[in-house]
Amino acid sequence: MLNNNFYCVLMAGGSGDKLWPWSRESKPKQFVSTGPGGITMLRRAYDRCLQLVPKENIIVATLEKYKSHVIDILPEISDKNLLLEPIGRHTAPCTVYAAYSIYKRNKDAVIAMIPADSIIENDDKTRSTMEKAMVYAAEHEVLLTMGVIPTRPETQYGYIQVAGGKEARDAGLPAPVKTFTEKPDESIATAFCKSGEFFWNSGIYIWRASLIKEECESLMPDITSLFNGWEQAVGSPDERAFINKVYTDCPKLSIDYGLMEKTSRAWIFPIDFKWTDLSNWDELYEVVPKDFENGNTCNTSSSIIKKCKQTITLSENRKKLIAAYGLEDFLVIDTEDVLLICPRTREAIGNLTSETGFPDFEQFR
């Protein structure tokens, strides 16, 4: 039986530029399909949570402008389980909003804060690991962050150093956090990996509602003070107006920088299931189904792919015939208003996406 004190908050904000033009500012990657099955990441994340907590305990935190996307993907979700932020202010204000909202419902709640745009296997290992972490958080005075053992010196991820060194990391048990480092350069990331003392920061956090409330009020008073009166406003007809006023003055701050780097209660809980942040096209390539012979992936019902290798071809029109010849390590991304054709390298993609910041191309961001 699922624990009625367990809650999941799916964080579904984001700028939408990581998989441009497949995702956009108007429709970030959690709201689009990333594989042949046509299932969005938000839907997959929600379905994983159904294995962990009661349906009524799954909450989606998103921007107000994305509400229609959430409803389209999750028509079963109730309005009371939508936390709508008027503007993006990163994860610290979102954490405070979620903590107060859930604490008002259930003072014994344990909350898993989960990014909706990560790729995670929906299997027994994932469910078991998350359940163990939530039980651990319920029984200990800790704020857990889920850590992944690095497989490469990735510069796009945050890193967490565990107290106790390599032995503590390799033990596979919960342990205190020593340091947080956000997106180091390649030389530092390489040193981190070689040391054996670091985890990747998955962005998944688990804590008791009462404890995160207490720590936020102690260490982030500049944010929590803006929520004065939340006891009456949250969950009432006045909530929307109250939150709009709060966010007008709220600083943009990550929960790592605002809280986790300051608290003495930060602990790491090792992940032993498959996790990908999906922060670029290379990471998508690693997780989508590919043909065995040449490593190509295509999402349409009809395709002619000849003399191509390690190439991603995607179209919003699943019935379109895609024909490609002689491409290697390329992206071919076809949307209603943008056709992207370029090498599958961060430099090439970055050069093109940076151009969309100019006035002539803003409509395509």
Image: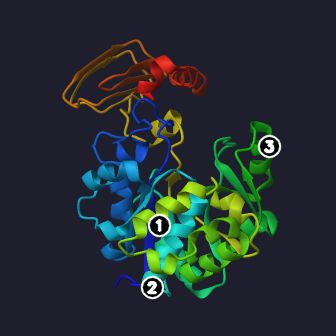
Residue type beneath disc 1: Phe
Marks 2/1: CA distance?
A: 21 Å
Image quarter of the N terminus: bottom left
Badges 2 and 1: C-beta atoms under 8 Å apart? no
Image quarter of the C terminus: top left
Sequence order check, earlier mark of 2 and 1: 2
Give the secondary structure at mark 2.
loop
Q: Quadrant of residue 355?
A: top right
The residue singled out by tag 3 in the image is 188
The residue singled out by tag 2 in the image is 106
Residue type beneath disc 3: Ile
The residue singled out by tag 1 in the image is 242
Please state which of residues 250 and 161 is positioned toward the viewer in this rendering. Answer: 250
Please state which of residues 76 and 343 is positioned toward the viewer in this rendering. Answer: 76
Residue type beneath disc 2: Asn
Sequence order check, earlier mark of 3 and 2: 2
